[in-house]
Image (cartoon, grey):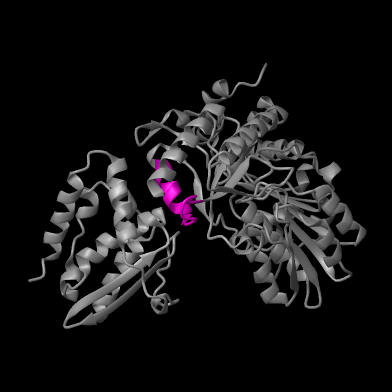
Amino acid sequence: MTKTINQIQDEIIKEFELFDNWEDRYEHLINLGQELPPLPKKLKTEDTLVPGCQSKVWLHISSQNATLHLQGQSDALITSGLLALILRIFNNQPPKEIQNAELYFIDRIKLAEHLSQTRANGLYSIIQRIKDYTIKC
Amino acid sequence: MTFDPKTIRQKFPILERKMNGHPLVYFDNASTTQKPLSVINAVSDYYKNHNANVHRGVHTLSQNSTDLYEGARKTVANFINADPKEIVFTSGTTEAINLVAMTFGRRNILKEDEMIISVAEHHSNLVPWQMLSALTGMTIRVIPVTDKGEFDIEAYKNLLSEKTRLVAITHMSNTLGTINPIKEIIKLAHENNTLVLIDGAQATPHINLDMQDLNADFYCFSGHKMYGPTGIGVLYGKDEILSEMIPYKGGGDMIERVTLERSDYKNSPYKFEAGTPNIAGAIGLAEAIKFLQETSLQEIQKHENELLEHATKELQKIEGIRIIGEAKNKGPVLSFTAHNPKTSASIHPYDIGTLLDKYGIAVRTGQHCTEPLMDYFKIPGTVRISFACYNTLEEIDTFIEALKKNLALLS
């Protein structure tokens, strides 16, 4: 059975607890970004480009069997790492669960600075785009 | 008194702050500079002791406030060797350029006419002209820069024609640091009977200005980039040109006489300053000018050149770094991109900026409001460090060490 959004968030929190300084936390995040599979070229379109990010972020969202399917890529590694975490949490989840989800992991893994709208990294825009999609489901 | 950045630093309270556990290294001065205590105190003193509306009250406090505001205008005028009536207070460079576009431009740059800008302009010296072009149908011609990021004077000469009504050029590029040969640019334009607007937002905190010597028709700058408050800026315009221009916003304090049918405007600069102006901002700007004069712009420039030289030399030693903008005549702005020397994969400026912040180092990353210039160099953006009088060689060494660690993490 698919894990719930909060179960995945708790897993991520545990994973990051292994690191006691920011360098290691960021190294892990960067590694996650590097491991994110590239988005097929045909899915990198104006439509999938998420505005409001200093780096380029493409996000392809579809729904199947009452769950959301997400693929994405960014040209910056830190943004890719954050995107990888978001995809891990939201992929294969029902739209309603995503809509109501509270993403507490960002604060707990001490990356809350990325949630600020002025950060221009697009994490806020990425989450917003996914939530907007669920409303249409 | 000899120039000592350590003494100067003591005048800037914010520089005592720690960021993410490290002493703040503020290298984002081309975005906005920090403010000396004298400027902060001048603004606060105005509200504490002198606040009243200007130009209209008969009471002493209003006269007091008017004296301070008009005194600020005189300080600005002296600073750039102009007449106070040639100084229009605006909210910043952006508003100053928009003012010229919407008044001078709407009347004088018409359908068959052209104007010239360069590819290195900040969006604020591009978008207002695009808006004007949409209104009047005039054509914008664009001068390229050389590979080193220098102004292409030959291309400029070729673009000047009998159709050219205005040349709008930055004095110093906010992205490349290039200081343009504006005296020559102005001379060539005037020989062509063309007026010139200079975007001086970047130049004012670094370069001595003399409007009589430069002979610019318009010169625009912002208070906040020269140690003054945000929300205050200046449009300098030659008296004979401003006098001919119509206002672009109407309201109180800009009129001589109003009936329900029509209004008679005051003379410039007042006809351009409708509504209650940013009085505290103007007073703060005058105080910032005093700071620049007391510290000595020549000494500041000398020190900033040393910083630029040192940073350039140290950055060039790092494998995978490419400096964007290698003009001979540069202000203290340094843009660069990075790639992994082993794989040639580019490292995103955003990643570098984010990790530098963890060391308390504030830099700017991205396109710096010069998207066409990024397209021109075929890069997604740069990391930009920019210096002010309070920066030190030691801070550059701190930055270089942090940058090396971060590049290793990102490679």
From this view, report whether residue A94 is shown above or below residue B244: below
Question: In percent of the image, x 69 and y 61: which residue is there?
Answer: B119
Q: Specify whether B129 is left or right of B214.
A: left
Quadrant where the N terminus of chain B is found in the figure: top right
Residue B150 falls left or right of residue A123: right
Residue B110 in view here: yes
Count of marks placed on residues: 0
- Residue positioned 49% across, 44% down in the render: B363
Q: Residue B154's x, y, as percent? A: 84, 59
Q: Pick the residue in front: A20 or B219.
A: A20
Measured from the top left, where is residue B60 in percent x and y?
Answer: 61, 35
Q: Quadrant of residue A58?
A: bottom left
Q: Nearer the viewer, residue B52 or B164?
A: B164
Q: Is residue B272 above or below residue B16?
A: below
Location of residue B319 in the rendering, given as x and y in whole percent from the top left corner? 53, 44
Span shown in magenta: B339-357
The furthest residue to the right: B191
Please give left or right for residue A15 compared with residue A113 in the image: left
Identify whether B167 is placed above or below B133.
Answer: above
Residue at the spot x=70%, y=40% of the render? B73
Q: Is residue B234 magenta?
A: no
Residue A44 placement (x, y as % from top left): 42, 75
Question: In which quadrant of the rendered view does residue A38 lie?
Answer: bottom left
Q: Is residue B348 magenta?
A: yes
Q: Nearer the viewer, residue B60 or B205?
A: B205
Between A63 and B403, the one nearer to me in the picture: B403
Q: Is residue B65 visible?
A: no
